[in-house]
Image (cartoon, coloured by chain):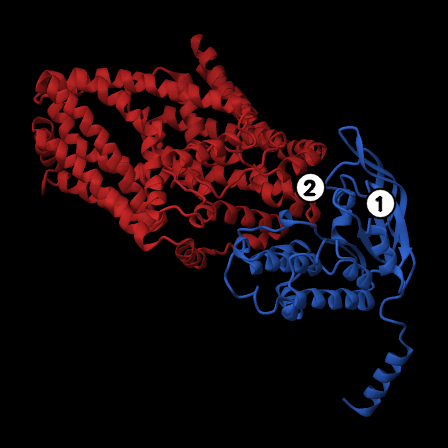
Amino acid sequence: MYTQFFKHHWLKSVRAPGYYKNLIVNIFMGLSILYFLVIFVLMGFMLPKILAEAAPQLDPALTFNGAMFFVIVLALLIRFLFQPLSTINLQSYQVLPIKRSKLVNYLLLKPLLNPANYLTLSFAIPFAITGINPSYGIGGAFQFILIVIFLIWFNTLFAIFLKRKFGSNILGIIVFLAIIAGLVALEYFKIYSIFDMSQRVFGFLIENPIGLLVVMGLSAVAFVLNKWFFAQNYYPESFDKKVAKKQQAETQNFSFMERFGKIGEIISLEMKLALRHKRTKNVLYTAALFLLYGLLFYPNDMYKENDAMLMLVAIFVTGIGMILFGQWIINWEGSYFDFLMTRNIDTQSYIKANYFLLLSLSIVSFILTTPYFLFGTDILINHSVAFLYNVGVNIHVYLFGATFNTKRLELSKGSAMNMQGVSYKNFIVIIPLLIVPMGLIGIFSLFGAKNIALIILAVLGLAGIIFWKQLLEITEKQFLRRKYALCEGFRKKE
Amino acid sequence: MNTEEIQSTINTTITMPPPVPVTANTVIKATDLRKIYNGVAVLNIPEITIKNGESFGLVGNNGAGKTTFFRLILDLIEASSGEVRIDGEKVARHDDWKAKVGSFLDESFLIDFLTPEEYFNFTGKVYGKSVGDITAFLESMKEFFNGEILGSKKLIRDLSKGNQKKTGIAAALLSDPQILILDEPFTALDPTSQIRLKRMLNELKIKKNMTMLISSHDLNHVTEVCDRIVVLEKGLVVRDIHTTEDTLKELESYFAV
């Protein structure tokens, strides 16, 4: 029976229209996974050295054990935010004579077979060799790897349970963050050291054979919790009830936007679009996380001299909202595009509304990243230039590029790695968006003339801001040329 | 009100011409209209005109080109040749006609993550209607909605197919359009709603002299609502009849192959 389910699942993904069409996207995904795999393996080998440097008084394995608890909680948060709930078209199976426990088991076990979940092992195995082996011996290293596997199971199942039980709403995330902040505070104010506790617990787990039983028990508990949840909410209607309750609370109003006439109406519609779909909400969270991206680079002396890299980070961070949502502009409205095209909305207003939306996203991102100015004048100049370039050039590139993206975007399914509706065109747009400014800075700083590159970028941006109307007219004409292709593309459901 | 005023109102009522003068101007004109997909002409209309106030019914089996014709009028697909004009103005890549036309073809005319109220509000605002206008309109739709659409706080995507259809039809009427285009408005509606819709369309025809283009698979309904019926077959106009008592029989015998 289970093999049948997996076969159906496989057929569903292979027979989805666009599976083969998306070959380039898949190749790109494959390459980026490979990239991360290599990074992880290297990190795994390097980590003992790094830890020894960071905390010379401690054995690397012990330092790692101390951090383990935090790693698990953080991983749980990330899973809670981004891990998709596995689904099966329950109704069509419910009417068949299949035991319901089988359906539930399938639903629960499916994510455990997802290879993406085991990416952590590419890091854990090298670390077991170089970090655990010297301290605990070969047996300890093996036990460590097994413990990691069971903890992955525990995290996966527990995150699913939390998500099913509480839903991934803002409140859940706030509670989660509050718990993490509480743990950090306990540590920081030396009230109770989680670090020491974690060190003792994981040391014990790795050393004693019982440790294996403990983590096994943990994943079993997570599994049973899920089973218990399903026992209570088996029928789709009980899910619906929950959904219906949520909807009522969720209908926000953006009447302040509606004062700006037709354009304001369209923008407020797009804001509702962004806040009422899983996929767009995930992007919002992602954008919030990426605001912190600069922290990986700016405090690090390694990147101080790498001007091109710093520019890339500046553009990315100051425009994060615009960059993430801009790639979907226009085609995220695919499901009601015919409606927009037949209503009393002239093309000019429609394009302008999208422009203003991206503009306000850029401004918000820029304002939120002003604390980075504390890292010095260089960063301040970089960010200001990046902002000008984002507003003057990148928004227009996105709007113009959007007319080529004829794929309908399905927004109701959300997950971190959801590439539906994404085509190679989304990657082409990256060239003027990120590569051009990065390249300019890189080339000019070779000759010690970084400032000239900065001026060129700023002038380009300013020109785009001054001539925004003319640029929008070009996009408008292009949009009218591509209108029918867009209409036709958006009518095709995937 | 004093007697003099009453008298004057009576006088004006009597002397007033009928509310909307019935003029026989052409509102929609298609010439040499062709749509070709992969070498096959799915629609081929040398010329067709639709007059002001006419109720135009379009019938034909699946694949006859009904929706294609509507989409060409609404500028949602590009004609392989020829053109459509509304009030003498070209439709293709223009915006002016949009203010005059109300339409509902399929679910891509609905914004499914809004509540019906939000959807009507958005549509109304886009046509420059005030909140009062919209409320008054929704009030007039109460019977048609049968108490199921407004105030439920449900999103459109959670409504039943029939209620979704009602929402779409109402949004098409909201702008008080001069021309109304509906693709199979009767399917998915319950019998009561079908009858109410027919009554509503007939009233609009008389009171507002609205030009209507309605396609349907149900020959009964379409003959009851439309004065003129055009039969499409494989993209060609094969019948163009003025509705009389015998029309239904004629159509039935045509389709009974």
Chain letter, colour red: A
A451 left or right of B238 in image: left
Q: Is residue B172 above or below residue B233?
A: below
Q: Colour of chain B?
A: blue
**Which kind of residue does numbered mark 2 sit on?**
Thr
Where in the figure is residue A137, as x and y percent of width and height? Answer: 9, 17
Q: Secondary structure at mark 1?
A: strand
Q: Secondary structure at mark 2?
A: helix
A450 left or right of A375 in image: right
Per the rendering, the mark at residue B133 is none
Per the rendering, the mark at residue B85 is 1
Tag 1 and tag 2, C-beta contact below 8 Å: no
Q: Residue at x 34, y 27 (%)?
A: A115
Q: Which residue is mark 2?
A: A347
Q: Is residue B132 above or below residue A165?
A: below
The image shows a total of numbered marks equal to 2
Where in the figure is residue B57, as x and y percent of width and height? Answer: 81, 55
Where in the figure is residue A246, as x and y percent of width and height? Answer: 41, 56
A292 left or right of B19 in image: left
Q: Is residue A357 above or below residue B202?
A: above
Residue A477 image-quadrant placement:
top right
Q: Residue at x 8, y 26 (%)?
A: A207
